[in-house]
Amino acid sequence: MANSRYLLTCLLLGLIIPAEAQHFSLSRLFYPNLTLKAEYNVPSNLDGTRDYGVSRTGFLGIIPLQSEVQLGYSLRKKFDLRAVHTVALAQYTQIQPTFDSKNDPSNGYKTLSLGILRLQASIKDRLWVYGGGLGMTESNETFFSPQPFFWGGAARMHILGLRTQFMYGSVLAYNQKLRFIPVFGLNKGLGKHWRVSALLPFMMNANYKATKWFNVDFLAGLSGYSGGFQVQTPEEKALRRENYRQIKTGVAANAHLFSVINVSLEAGVTTFRQLRTFNSARENLTSYTPATTPYIGASVRYITSRSRLSSKFMRRMSLGEGGINW
């Protein structure tokens, strides 16, 4: 099971579709931590007459809820040893779109979300990952009349030796419409320094571990937002929805400092971008394809604690190792 934490991280960020993450091979999900992050897309041509840009800042907190080994007894008079580890996920993100360098909405969108992620391993059922959560992305004007999103999913993991794992499962997500998404993940170590990970159709990553305290990620993934805003007309205040999607590819340099802090700097381009607006009847009002543009990002992670129970659990599951490589 060694290094399977990368697939677990893929699963989390693939499930939380509206959430933004710096890059998925950094987070060690089952250690409690607080992550502060920021990302800026350089404004680029929207429709020949205007430029569109977007930036985001926020935090993600991972809070341990349960780490224990349970002994069960089935109706078939068979014992089953089960290990479970559960964490809570809390996220806040401030998203600020701009049109010709003017903020619109003026105070941007705020994303609030809460979720649960559970890792379960047993003699009978092997290794599973479960997750679920809910949240909302709204402007100040629509904050008290939100359209919530939710997600839930499960994945089965198979271990092929110490350097190869794969997983398959499904995600059920709602954000204006209900979607069922099959997922497939792979994590493969290549030599002493390289590892490739993927959770299709969401993300791909190649990680180069230069030293115990420094590593580099080459990444690609889907991201975006779907937020509510308000338009003032002569007759009424109309509610609207703005949907933005992009594919970003980039490189991130990660340094692990003082045993509890990880600093990451990231740069790349966003492409295959799409910006749409909808009315309350979910009818498409406008559709744009902003031009490809560079982006930069940064994140700081603080490992809030390493409880003895949590650390022991992760080592027994082969999910922990000396010299943390985020």
Image (cartoon, rainbow, N blue to C red):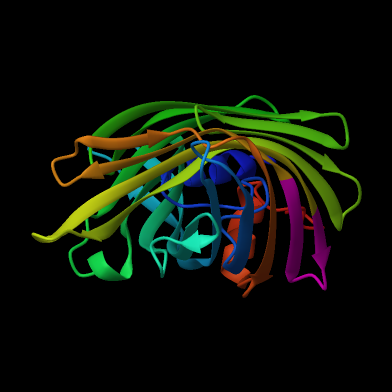
Question: Which quadrant would the C terminus be assigned to in this image?
Answer: bottom right
Q: Is 128 left or right of 309, judged from the image as shown? A: left
Q: Which of 173 and 37 is in front in this view?
A: 37
**Residue 159 x, y percent position in the rendering:** 60, 29
- Taken as a whole, is the magenta stretch helix, strand or loop? strand
The residue shown at (87%, 29%) is: 191
Q: Is residue 107 left or right of residue 161?
A: left
Q: Considering depth in this image, is 214 or 4 the residue closer to the camera?
A: 214
Q: The magenta stretch spans which residues?
A: 254-267
Quadrant in the rendering for residue 111: bottom left
Task: Residue 244: give x, y in percent of width and height.
Answer: 43, 43
Q: Is residue 301 magenta?
A: no
**Which residue appears farthest toward the left when viewing the image?**
235
Q: Which of 46 and 166 is in front in this view?
A: 46
**For residue 201, above or below residue 64:** above
Residue most toward the right? 211
Q: Can the viewer see residue 100?
A: yes
292 to the left or right of 157: right
Residue 124 visible at all: no
Question: Residue 46 location, x and y as percent?
Answer: 51, 40
**Quarter assignment of residue 257:** bottom right
Q: Position of residue 54 (x, y in %)?
A: 54, 54
Residue appearing at x 47%, y 60% in the figure: 95
Quadrant location, the N terminus: top right
- Total numbered labels: 0
Residue 257 in magenta stretch: yes
Residue at 28% x, 49% y: name it.
241
At x 60%, y 62%, the residue is 31
